[in-house]
Structure formats: C-alpha cells, structure tokens
C-alpha cells in the first residue's frame, strides 16, 4: 500500500483519482476485518507523504470515496471508524483534519450528507465520534 501511495502521489490528478477510486472500490468489497486493515494501511501510508502531497492526496481519497455507491461509501466510513483504535493518535487527528478540509470543498448538501454518514459509521462501528472542529 505504501509504495502505491508514494507512486500515485506524483501521478497526474486524473490518473491518481482513477487508481484511488479503483482501490477504494476494491477495499469496500473486502471482508470487514481485511477492509479495516486496508483502510488503516492507506491512512498510515498517506501520513508518510511529504506535507505538500498529503492534503491533495486526502482530497483525492475523499473524492474517490464520495464517488462510491452509498453502500460502498458506508463500508469505507465504518472501516475508517473501526481503524481509529489501531492508528497512532497523531495520524488519526491529522487524517481527520484533512478529511474535514476536503469535505468543506463540497456543496453544503453533500457536506451534510457526508457528516450524517460519518456519524452513522461511528455509531455502527461502536467507536466514539471524534470532536470535529
């Protein structure tokens, strides 16, 4: 996962979106435990990118997830929520910050739908929802 993320970080935007969309679609179809590990691996791999590449890559990841079917999107959100206890706290907080920044770029209706889905995902995962500022 880490090598793929590093390679894609320098790829053209369209290629990056296509590859990340294919990857998150594949991850969404994995069994639950494997999906959680894959999401955790992706979050950790992105956290290791150069600071100038992290923000844009998180934006691509969110765009790819937003392009999934509602069921696939929820599967990815639940997996991300379930990964929280296994992520280093600083990585989790940084990822959450980048996700919120990326979501703020969407129209208000999509922002609300994303946040509603995120709340539901944390409830489903049985993980306390982090403070979103």
Image: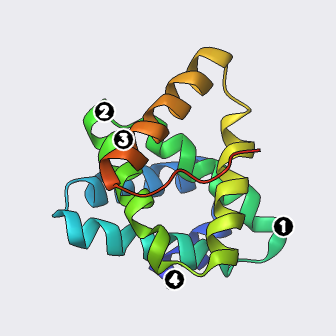
Q: Which quarter of the rendered picture does the C terminus lie within? A: top right
- Report the Cα–Cα distance between label 4 and label 3: 22 Å
Q: Is residue 55 left or right of residue 46?
A: right
Q: Which residue is drawn at 73% across and 65% down?
A: 54
Q: Circle 2 sits in a helix, a strand or a loop, which is it? A: loop
* Residue at numbered disc 1: 52
Q: Residues within 10 Å of mark 1 (few under 14, many from 20)?
A: few
Q: Nearer the viewer, mark 1 or mark 3?
A: 3
Instruction: Tell me which label, 2 or 1, sits earlier in the chain.
Output: 1
Residue lying farthest to the left in this orientation? 31
Instruction: Tell me which label, 4 or 3, sits earlier in the chain.
Output: 4
Instruction: Tell me which label, 2 or 4, sits earlier in the chain.
Output: 4
* Residue at numbered disc 4: 2
- Report the Cα–Cα distance between label 3 and label 2: 6 Å
Q: How crowded is mark 2: few (under 14 residues within 10 Å), some or many (20 or more)?
A: few
Is disc 3 in contact with disc 2, using a CB cutoff of under 8 Å?
Answer: yes
- Residue 14 position within the rendered picture, expressed as x and y whole percent measured from the top left: 58, 47
Instruction: Tell me which label, 4 or 1, sits earlier in the chain.
Output: 4
Q: Circle 3 sits in a helix, a strand or a loop, which is it? A: helix
Is disc 2 in contact with disc 4, using a CB cutoff of under 8 Å?
Answer: no
* Residue at numbered disc 2: 69
Q: Circle 1 sits in a helix, a strand or a loop, which is it? A: helix
Q: Residue at x 59, y 15 (%)?
A: 109
Residue 73 marker: 3
Q: Which residue is drawn at 48% across and 45% down?
A: 64
- Report the Cα–Cα distance between label 2 and label 1: 30 Å
- Report the Cα–Cα distance between label 4 and label 1: 17 Å
- Residue 44 position within the rendered picture, expressed as x and y whole percent measured from the top left: 56, 78
Q: Which of marks 4 and 3 is in front?
A: 3
Q: Which quarter of the rendered picture does the N terminus lie within? A: bottom left
Instruction: Tell me which label, 1 or 3, sits earlier in the chain.
Output: 1
- Report the Cα–Cα distance between label 2 and label 4: 26 Å
């Amino acid at each position: 996962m880490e090598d793929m993320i590093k390679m894609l970080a320098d790829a053209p935007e369209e290629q990056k979106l296509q590859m990340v969309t294919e990857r998150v679609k594949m991850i969404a179809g994995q069994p639950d435990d494997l999906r959680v590990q894959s999401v955790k691996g992706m979050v950790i791999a992105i956290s290791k990118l150069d600071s100038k590449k992290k923000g844009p890559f998180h934006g691509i990841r969110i765009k790819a997830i937003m392009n999934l079917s509602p069921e696939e999107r929820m599967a990815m959100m639940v997996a991300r929520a379930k990964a929280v206890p296994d992520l280093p706290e600083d990585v989790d907080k940084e990822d959450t910050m980048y996700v919120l920044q990326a979501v703020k770029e969407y129209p208000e209706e999509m922002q609300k739908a994303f946040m509603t889905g995120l709340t539901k995902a944390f409830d489903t995962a049985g993980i306390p929802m982090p403070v979103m500022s």
